Image: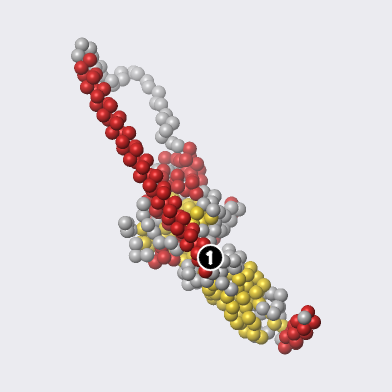
Amino acid sequence: MSKILLSVFFFSFSLFTFAQTETFVGSVVEEETNYHMANAIVAIEGTALAQTTNNEGKFSFRDKIPVGEHIVTVTKEGYEVKFFIINIENGKKVIVDKVEISLTKDEEKRRKKLLKEQSKEEKKKEKEREEKIKEAQKELEKREKKLAKEKKKLKKSNKDVIISYDDATPAANTSTTPTVDPNIVTPLQVKYAGILGVTPEEITNIPLYEFIDEWMGIPYLMGGATKDGIDCSSFSQRLFTTVNGQYIERTAQKQFDSNYTDKFQGKEFLKEGDLLFFKGVGDYSNDISHVGVYLGNMKFVNATSRRGTSGVSGVKISDLSEPFWTSRFVSAGRRINNN
């Protein structure tokens, strides 16, 4: 059998001449979401040539590619195998703008299960929050009733007590030392003020930063929606739902396309909570492949596969002024309340 295969190989080889300078480049995206797919394997059948896509879904063959027709396969765990044909000619570069791969049925089921679990988890948390609020309200009512009773008792027992009131204004020559309330600035404010490069007093949206702190460092996972792994649009969706009580769409492109997203490009108009939309590297179509949430001082929080200078991927705070993000920036978007 091996001899037969070997003879077929040499026969095929004899039909081709080599294109010394040819290249074959392109990008791989997920069909449903248009996300750029990292770590997809692109192989030229009948040769030993194969490439793995980078974080932006790009691949590039710079080896010797035989002139002629070739079947190309694209494979990635959780996705159907994609087949297409290319024709290598002398002096021509083959460019494939977009190879779309679709989820397998098993992967679709897995993701639906994850979304169902996420929804169940959110409902559970919402129920717990409502119960805590009810308990707090009951406790407050009890305290108010108790205070009212104590007040009545004090009025009855205080008839024979003589009370006088002096002016509380200090004398002109009296010097007072101001006291600092340690509760004015919290460790959370100090932590994120340092990251954003602002004063702790400027960190005022405590629920927002509590949410960020809870998710900081969670791994990036395409299609993920839990603390085992999460992608950019699921993170922004969770943030808006949890912090703002506002539903937004599941994918970055749909969040961008929404009628409830008021888009603008002037970075000088950015406010805390604005969405930031980005395209892929080298993508001239302005298709949205990434989303983050603006915090202030040109910093934004996002779930990203990019490690950058920090060497860490996942949920983190990034700098909008970095060339990597500046070159990909398409638009900002302010959500109009759609509840």
Q: Quadrant of the N terminus?
A: bottom right
Q: Is residue 103 above or below residue 69?
A: above
Which residue is drawn at the image coordinates 35% and 18% (left, top)? Answer: 174
Q: Position of residue 123 (x, y in %)?
A: 40, 51
- At numbered mark 1, what does the secondary structure look like: helix, strand or loop? helix
Q: Position of residue 14 (x, y in %)?
A: 75, 87
Which residue is drawn at the image coordinates 63% and 70% (left, top)? Answer: 41
Quadrant in which residue 144 is drawn: top left
Q: Report whether 33 appears left or right of 25.
A: left
Q: Is residue 249 above or below residue 300?
A: below
Which residue is drawn at the image coordinates 34% and 41% (left, top)? Answer: 133
Count residues near mark 1 (Cα–Cα under 10 Å), then give few for <14, some for 14-19, many for 20+.
some
- Answer yes or no: is residue 272 visible: no
- Give the amino acid type for the residue marked by disc 1 in the picture: Glu
- Answer yes or no: is residue 152 visible: yes
Q: Is residue 90 above or below residue 165?
A: below
Q: Position of residue 305 (x, y in %)?
A: 56, 58
Which residue is drawn at the image coordinates 53% and 55% (left, top)? Answer: 229
Name the residue beneath numbered marker 1.
107
